[in-house]
Amino acid sequence: MDSASAHHHEEHHDHHELGWWQKYVFSTDHKVIGIQYGITGLSFLLFGFGLMMLMRWQLAYPGDPLPIIGKIVENVLGEEAFKDGVMASDFYNELGAMHGTIMVFLGIVPVAFAAFGNYVVPLQIGAPDMAFPKINMASFWSFAVGGVIMLVSFFVPGGAAKSGWTSYSPLAAVNGLHENMWMTGQTFWLLGMVMLITSSLLGSVNFITTIIQLRAPGMSWMRMPYFVWAQMVTAYLLLLAFPPLEAASFMQLMDRVAGTSFFMPSGLVVNGQPWAVAGGGSPLLWQHLFWFLAHPEVYVLILPGLGIVGDVIANGTRKPLWSYKGLVYSTMGIGFLSFVVWAHHMYLTGMGSKVSTFFQTTTVLISVPSVVIVTVLLMSLWGGSIKFTVPMLFATGFLPMFGLGGLTGIPLAFNSIGLYLHDTYYVIGHFHYIVAPGTIFAIFAGVYYWYPKAVGRNMNQFWGRVHFFGSFACMNGIFFPMFLQGMAGMHRRWYDGGAGWDLTQNVLHWNPFMFWSAFILGLFQIPFILNFFLSIKFGRLVSDNPWDATTLEWAAPSPPPHGNFATQPSAYTGPYEYSHPEVAADFSPQWLPLPEKTETLRGDGVTEKARPNLVDQAMVDSPETQPRA
Amino acid sequence: MEIPYTVTPRPDTQLWNAKIGIWLFLASEVMLFGGLFSGYVFLRLGAEPGFWPHGLLNVPVGTMNTAILILSSVTVVMAWASLKMRRYTHYLVYLGATIVCGLIFLVVKLAYEYPQKFDHFGIYLKEEARLKYEPYLGNEHLAKKGLAPRTEITGHLHAVDISRDGREEEVEIHSPSEVSHLAQEKGVQILGYHINLDTENADPTNPANDRPHFWHKPPSEKQAHVEAKDVLWATAFLPKHSNYFATYFTITGLHGLHVFGGIVVFTYFFFRSRKMYDAEPEHLANRLEVAGLFWHFVDLVWIFVFPIFYLL
Amino acid sequence: MSTPSTHSQPGHENEHAAVTVHVRAYMLVFGALLVLTGVTVALSYFDFGSMQANIVIAMIVATVKAGLVALIFMHLNHERRQIYVLLAFTVFFACGLFFLTWLHYWDPIRLPH
């Protein structure tokens, strides 16, 4: 908000004299910040994947020494982590907790929400930048500090946090006891979370303000691309759901370093000794406050992905989204409902049956807008002339994977089934289907789709296809057996992968299969990484609008300069005017008015053939899509 | 292209950017303090009878601090009005007054109220031992009146009995923190506490002591000796004393951080606003309005904190 | 504060008059807040029969005070629609937070004995 008009001229000069540090490191340009978020977030995704590979090895071959890597980790982190190449159980717990934390808070959210949101949202609404560029920079750097704190926590005495990504008290409050409780992994986790939450808050304030205030002329609410809508709802969820977890983090921090008992019940016994605190706290309070964030967080993870997929599908099918408004209203509905379903994560706490019934009902309710969204996206494919570009492959791959993840979630909504499946691999399979082949595929779709905008060159399409088909097969190889194991009763936190339990003997053979699926999945990311970096230099040069897309970001030069657009663009039509019967090309961009003749479409004159179907007609007929008077 | 609507409002929303930004931020603050307050309600409803202390805070000082914070809210809004009327000197005076109010609030809190608490000591008694200390608790009297029982003896710690490597001795205590240091020494075991009683424990059956007093009374000369085996939990009035003090210190601490943040912003304005005033007074007024909204919110939180912790 | 037609140079005369009216309101609210602070303190030494009643009454006074600050000092009595919309969201979700506490005591966990 500093770049006030009065200092216009001074500022203008500054832009030319920006040093390397201000241009690429401490930048306030939304595109640079978006790329910073993207690269950092993707690196964290890779790192989190690495943690998971270590765990998968232990599950597949419990007690076997891990070749090469085991020795390396042993040398770096000491015998507490690996002894003679064999993983220690405490270290396994660290990996579990940090895999979840890193994937959710340092991987998916920064990439799907912050990176794409920063890069694409201002372009799509025709804005020169985010509303508060300096706050935007602060958001990224507080995220970076949070990430560093999380990474450093592996090296403090006792290692990183190991109470699961949910950090349930009282376990989390008494974990890693040390004479200086500040220097422990769990405390670092809490401090890191405070930084990450701060970053999300700054980011979401910026996103919402930008979307409300900086829309281009003509960009009415119902002309915004679905991606912008998804980002806006996500930002609201982050804004309002994260602070209670920040409050809870402060409380748990106090429990650890000041000896309070917010979450510590009376009469707690730890390691055979009475735990010396006042008591009278409630472990359930942590669970309530945690899930008050963490359920909306699930939608934070998926909504930006749905936004990307919506844009890509409209582009790939060359027709408007089927029921754009239904999509938008369902997304808002999910936003509201997501705040009243959190306790379905807590059926096993022994909540009263009335409370369980309430949350069971709301949870089943929220599946309605979710199903509407999937239906809209599926129906959008119908009758389209689909171009299977790489982004479109990932977007279409996303749909069945997200569907599978969503449908397997419905049984979990029910109290009685929840009691049986709670904490089994079934739950792990369910949410990984949504987040891994779901959101991560959407992220890949977004990377391949907007890469030409950011670089001016396209990524290699052949290696993109290899990346897609390989990843698709391997993702299912990892996650589908989880349903089978979970229904057999395999618990999610067993260090031996179920080897020591009778009930899981029939499903043990899946463990090596899942490990090797994960390993090959890792190999299939190599073409992507190479493709990503090599295309900066060697990719095919493309025009400003290589996908023949309609939304405003494609009106800007590739890559867009500081300030994005040479002149202020306007939005004349809805976001997805593909295959308009009055236009010769199969797309009519938002920044160009539709031909005059459109006005007569409302009445007669156009044969049935010229209208692909009634839905398209509804789109055309709606006043939103008419050129501005 | 430059970022629009930094000073002038956007025609359709009639708002400039920072106004929406600050309200969004305040919305998240509502949820932050909302989380803490709902934690407070949760814990207080769950507390066993007699385990939610009353009247341990200094009400006159709290009332004064409340008034000071309210005054600072008025001065900041007056500073904004002065800018709107283009009276720069008035603006500086009001802004300065706001900063001074904020500082007084913080100093009173950090240099007077908190240390006074850290100096106080409380001993929760085991249920089976409460009858033994009835002369200090007066529970029979309270039960007759239908009031919650006393479970704690409070006052200023005078000395502790310890056994050091099997030898018993009495150690004089000047500050409660010495007790925790003693307890951590090897071979030391605490056997009992000598405490200068607060008036409620010194004269527990006096009806005047049934409810908290407005004016804070110093501990009486009367002393009590509490054996360690009867003690459920003994500590100074630190966050770990009870969930009451835990929530009190967490919420007021976080609130204090907000006050501090506000002071930093206002101080920056105080020294650095002349240039902007000359160039774009309206932009400066907007900025002050944004900072003021934050400051009012901090005041608003205190309006709830004060009765919840000091009075109820 | 500023009227919709205002641009970088406000209609100075009108603005001045409007602000003077505001100032009077600020002073009245200041007085009211001080009085209400006194009322809160005084009420806390009066027993309304039960702790619940005492809490409810103290919270009502606090809410009135907070309302005055929000409406007058924070100008919520004449704000733009967008702000009300986002505050409505916040109120909805904040209610969810307290709903949490209420649920817990409405139908508590039964521990096995």
Image (cartoon, rainbow, N blue to C red):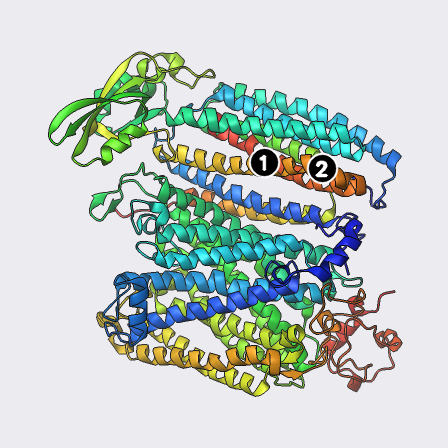
CA gap, disc 2 and disc 1: 15 Å
Residue at screen point 34% across, 39% down: A259
**C23, B146: nearer the viewer:** C23
Q: Which residue lies furthest to the left in this view?
A: B166
Can the viewer see residue A496?
A: yes
Residue annotated with mark 1: B298
2 and 1 marks in contact (CB < 8 Å): no
Q: Which of marks 2 and 1 is in front?
A: 1
Disc 1, SS? helix
Q: Which amino acid does label 1 sit on?
A: Val
The C terminus of chain A: image quadrant: bottom right
Q: Residue B101 carries which label?
A: none
Please report the residue visible at 52 percent of the width from the left and 65 percent of the height from the top.
Answer: A40
Tell me what residue is drawn at x 25 percent, y 74 percent.
A65
In this orientation, which residue lies closer to the viewer: A154 or A230?
A154
Residue A226 as seen in the image, left or right of residue A483: right
Residue B208's place in the image compared with A237, above or below, is above
Q: Is residue A474 left or right of residue A468?
A: left
Residue C75 shows which numbered tag?
Answer: 2
In the rendered structure, the answer to whether residue C87 lies left or right of residue A573 reads left
- Answer yes or no: is residue B140 visible: no
Q: What residue type is labelled 2?
A: His
Q: Are marks 2 and 1 on the same chain?
A: no
Percent of width and height locating residue A183: 35, 49
